[in-house]
Amino acid sequence: MHLLQNECYHIYNRGNNKQPIFFNDNNYIYFIKKIREQLAICSEIICYCLMPNHFHIIIQANEKSVSERGSFGGKPMQEFAYRVGILLSSYSQAINKQNKTTGSLFQQKTKVKILSEQVEGKQVSYAENCFFYIHNNPLRAGLTKDLKEWQWSSYPDYIGVRKGTLCNKELFFEITDLSKGDIINRSDYPLEESTVAKFY
């Protein structure tokens, strides 16, 4: 995991062998608390969506994200990567204690995808597409019929039905030129698989 300052990234991981990682409401709440404690202090949280067996977070790297925090395996480690490790480790320990289990809860390697790339010499941003893609996860999975009712994502904050403070909504609107009205009107955004495949 190596981030570049001011770039946006999609961070995601799932349960080992696709097993659940959230077992009750308190687990979701605890994980969001850990995002605030570990990741929000070294990056700008753009949005998130927690699902029963995986999670998605979009962040923008800042100066603190890319600062070095010692080394791992002989390679320099950035602050953000270090904090992701702390988040997943502490959460896993809590779940193992709760469930009286042992072993790894998450897949070994957390995925990190940059949300921009060069296409014919021009910088193309996928932040908008990824935003709608991850927020629509509960709908596609049949967990809800209305996205604003899935409380384990930042979607309710973006459409104004909840006053969450974890995400930097102003930054997202600045990056994409979207408005709250645009998000409400495109809540059933039909993201094409070919678009997703470009960076997943």
Image (spheres, helix red, strand yellow):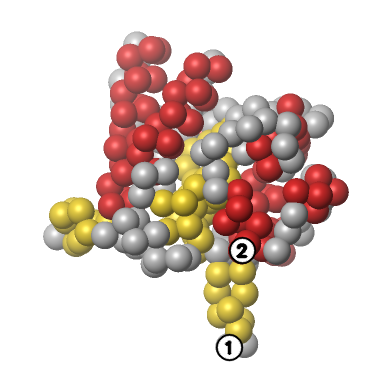
In which quadrant of the rendered image does the C terminus lie? Answer: bottom right
Q: Which mark is residue 175?
A: 2
Judge left or right: residue 121 versus residue 73. right
Do the CB atoms of the residues marked 2 and 1 lie less than 8 Å apart? no
Residue 25, image x, y percentages: 55, 17
Residue 197, located in which quarter of the rendered image? bottom right
Is residue 52 shown to the viewer in this render?
A: yes
Vertical position of residue 42 compared to residue 139: above or below: below
Sort mark 1 into few (<14), some (14-19) or many (20+) by Cα contacts within 10 Å: few
The furthest residue to the bottom: 121
Amino acid type of the residue that numbered disc 1 sits on in the rendered structure: Gly
Assess disc 2: are there few (<14), some (14-19) or many (≥20) residues with their C-alpha within 10 Å of its C-alpha.
few
Q: Nearer the viewer, residue 183 or 92?
A: 183
Label 2, label 1: how far apart the Cα atoms are = 20 Å
Seen at 28% across and 52% down, the residue is 79
- Residue located at (64% from left, 46% from top): 134
**Vertical comparison of 4 with 24: above or below:** below
The residue lying toward the viewer, choosing from 182 and 170, is 170
| Amino acid at pointer 2 | Ile
- Quadrant containing the N terminus is bottom left
Is residue 197 in view from this perspective? no
Location of residue 178 (image quadrant): bottom right
On screen, residue 171 versus residue 64, left or right, reads: right
Classify residue 77 by image quadrant.
bottom left
Report the residue marked by disc 1.
Answer: 121
Disc 2 vs disc 1: which is toward the camera? 2
Task: Locate residue 32, reporting x and y percent.
Answer: 48, 31
Most foreground residue, 98 or 82: 82
Residue 58 coordinates in the image, percent (x, y): 53, 51
Considering only order in the chain, which callout, 1 or 2, is on the residue closer to the N terminus? 1
